[in-house]
């Protein structure tokens, strides 16, 4: 591995991963890539673990029903914040099942209900289908429909990678046209924030660090966004007036510098922002807590930071 220092457990995982035979995700169709990703779950991530509530929901969307999944550590809950979570996967991969473990851990650790959104994926549904569904889900949850079984007082938006991008884009949309409830904070985990520019970390970690240059290009080609539009590249838009944020990055991630740039942009726009960088680890670590045991400590530390932010902002 060239360049940056790797944690031992990260090096072991990357050695295993890079030695695997067979095609890479960018060499197959999107359905085949999704099947490959799902097959890796048992190797890479921890079990979901016990939880009082895991319940599937459905809401009306622009192009048909949108599936959601509610996670809660309590069967009954007083009025309070609700987290909407948008999964990663380059806008092409990822689903509710694959994100059960981190969403359940988030619900347990923060003692808050988490709602995961099964937004439409590219290339079958290119940009802006994903942002449309994520915004619609936030607006639907904000109306506290009877099917939700909760009494939310405000929204917290979170997501990783492509989902971090979607959490930011949704926060921007709801700043400009508010929903029935306010967005109190957002958390972007190793997000893509600027699809029109290459940053130094992209070149530094383009090979052998899990997320590769070829993979990034395949995701972008499948998603087919307008890279100059804020609904694809939040850094192309106005960041002033956004809700307070936590930005999490990984030190050995080609997207690392996009996360750094977004955190700096928020600060320059006068938005309260906390920045955490997990040194010596790679993109995707919240889904790699079995393969990379130290990732569990990272996830818990960043959950604690988000919990402290939420506590400061509660009315």
Image: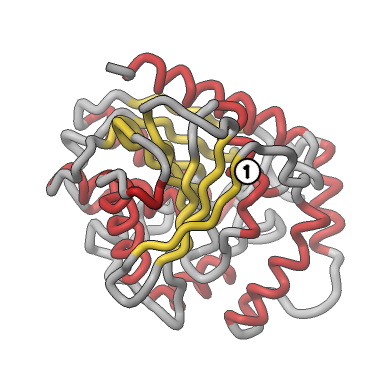
From the viewer's perspective, tell me whether residue 31 is left or right of residue 91.
Answer: right
Viewer-proximal residue among 297 and 57: 57
User: In this view of the protein, can residue 169 be seen by the observer?
Assistant: no
Viewer-proximal residue among 236 and 206: 236
Answer above or below: position of 177 versus 299. Answer: below
User: In this view of the protein, can residue 254 be seen by the observer?
Assistant: yes
Number of residue marks: 1
Q: Residue 271 location in percent, x, y?
A: 24, 28
Q: Quadrant of the C terminus?
A: top left
At 68% from the left and 54% from the top, the residue drawn is 209
Q: Could you tell me which secondary element the residue under label 1 belongs to? A: helix
At 44% from the left and 35% from the top, the residue drawn is 247
Viewer-proximal residue among 9 and 153: 153
Viewer-proximal residue among 272 and 125: 125
From the viewer's perspective, tell me whether residue 220 is left or right of residue 234.
Answer: right
At 85% from the left and 55% from the top, the residue drawn is 15
From the viewer's perspective, tell me whether residue 215 is left or right of residue 243.
Answer: right
Q: Residue 203 location in percent, x, y?
A: 54, 56
At 77% from the left and 67% from the top, the residue drawn is 39
Q: Which residue is tagged 1?
A: 102
- Residue 18: image quadrant is bottom right
Q: Residue 14 location in percent, x, y?
A: 79, 53
Answer above or below: position of 189 versus 272. Answer: below
From the viewer's perspective, tell me whether residue 109 is left or right of residue 238.
Answer: right
Q: Residue 111 location in percent, x, y?
A: 54, 26
Give the image's coloring scheme: secondary structure
């Amino acid at each position: 591995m060239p360049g940056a220092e790797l944690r031992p457990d990260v090096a072991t995982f990357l050695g295993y991963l890079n030695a695997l035979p067979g095609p890479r995700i960018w060499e197959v169709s999107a359905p085949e890539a999704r099947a490959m990703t799902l097959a890796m779950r048992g190797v890479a991530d921890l079990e979901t673990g016990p939880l009082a509530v895991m319940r599937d929901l459905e809401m009306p969307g622009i192009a048909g029903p949108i599936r959601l999944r509610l996670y809660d550590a309590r069967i009954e809950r007083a009025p309070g914040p609700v987290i909407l979570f948008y999964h990663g996967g380059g806008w092409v991969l990822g689903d509710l099942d694959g994100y059960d473990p981190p969403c359940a851990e988030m619900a347990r650790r923060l003692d808050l209900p988490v709602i995961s959104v099964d937004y439409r994926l590219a290339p079958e549904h290119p940009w802006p289908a994903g942002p449309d569904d994520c915004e619609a889900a936030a607006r639907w949850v904000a109306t506290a429909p009877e099917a939700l079984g909760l009494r939310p007082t405000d929204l917290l938006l979170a997501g990783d990678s492509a989902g971090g991008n979607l959490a930011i884009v949704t926060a921007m949309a709801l700043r400009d046209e508010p929903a029935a409830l306010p967005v109190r904070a957002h958390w972007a985990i190793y997000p893509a924030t600027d699809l029109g520019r290459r940053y130094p970390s992209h070149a530094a970690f383009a090979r052998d660090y899990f997320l590769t240059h070829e993979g990034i290009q395949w995701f972008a080609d499948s998603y087919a966004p307008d890279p100059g539009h804020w609904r694809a590249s939040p850094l192309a838009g106005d960041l002033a007036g956004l809700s307070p944020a936590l930005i999490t990055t990984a030190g050995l991630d080609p997207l690392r510098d996009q996360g750094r740039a977004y955190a700096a942009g928020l600060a320059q726009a006068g938005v309260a922002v906390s920045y955490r960088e997990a040194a010596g680890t790679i993109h995707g670590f919240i889904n790699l807590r079995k393969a990379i045991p130290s990732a569990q400590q990272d996830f818990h530390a960043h959950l604690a930071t988000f919990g402290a932010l939420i506590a400061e902002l509660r009315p």
